[in-house]
């Protein structure tokens, strides 16, 4: 694990707001919707797709599944855009199954605590592919200063 700084990122995709207990149903549905509309996401800056954990408020999680694109791209109907400023993150390269990504994030939070790094709820998970096969993912947790 290491601390990195990512440049500004623009993500366009499908927003999901749900209680923790509902996320395991709603997120896969959002991915299916996104992949059926992937041709609408123009001027992409990565070959893979990204899931962002935006925030948690009153036990409702806001997630965004989408593609990273060049700034200023049109937002297709039913999708939303998120502009993420340049900032520092704790980074981990995950090579296990998709089902173990949550565990990797948990290990990242533990490592940060053990090393005196204050992190927030904002997370980036890069590496998704259509059909959601197991593939390498780059995981990031925002560092709070």
Image (cartoon, helix red, strand yellow):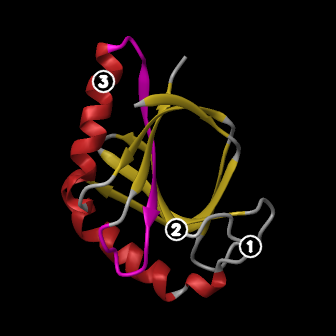
Of labels 3 and 1, earlier in sequence is: 1
Q: Which mark is residue 43?
A: 1
Q: Look at mark 2 in the image and give the residue it sits on.
A: 48
Of labels 3 and 2, earlier in sequence is: 2
User: For the residue labelled by badge 3, is the local secondary structure a helix, a strand or a loop?
Assistant: helix
Q: From what the image shows, is residue 96 above or below residue 104?
A: below
Q: Residue at the spot x=43%, y=73% of the render? A: 129
Q: CA distance from mark 3 to mark 2?
A: 27 Å
User: For the residue labelled by badge 2, is the local secondary structure a helix, a strand or a loop?
Assistant: loop
* Residue 67 image position (x, y, % from top left): 58, 67
| Span highlighted in magenta in the image | 115-134
Q: Residues within 10 Å of mark 2 (few under 14, many from 20)?
A: some
Assess whether residue 110 is covered by the magenta stretch: no
Tell me the quadrant of the picture where the N terminus can be found. top left
Q: Residue at the spot x=48%, y=78% of the render? A: 34
Q: Residue at the spot x=28%, y=51% of the render? A: 101
Q: Residues within 10 Å of mark 1 (few under 14, many from 20)?
A: few
The quarter of the displayed image where residue 58 is located: top left
Q: Look at mark 3 in the image and give the residue it sits on.
A: 111
């Amino acid at each position: 694990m290491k601390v990195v700084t990512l440049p500004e990122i623009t993500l366009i995709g499908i927003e999901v707001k749900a209680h923790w207990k509902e996320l395991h149903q709603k997120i896969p549905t959002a991915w299916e919707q996104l992949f059926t509309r992937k041709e609408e996401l123009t001027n992409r800056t990565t070959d893979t797709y990204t899931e962002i954990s935006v925030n948690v408020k009153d036990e409702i999680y806001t997630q965004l599944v989408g593609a990273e694109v060049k700034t200023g791209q049109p937002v297709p109907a039913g999708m939303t855009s998120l502009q993420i400023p340049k900032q520092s993150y704790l980074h981990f390269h995950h090579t296990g199954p998709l089902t173990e990504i949550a565990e990797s994030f948990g290990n990242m939070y533990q490592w940060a605590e053990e090393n005196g790094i204050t992190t927030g709820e904002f997370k980036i998970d890069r590496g998704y592919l259509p059909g959601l096969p197991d593939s390498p993912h780059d995981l990031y947790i925002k560092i709070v200063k």
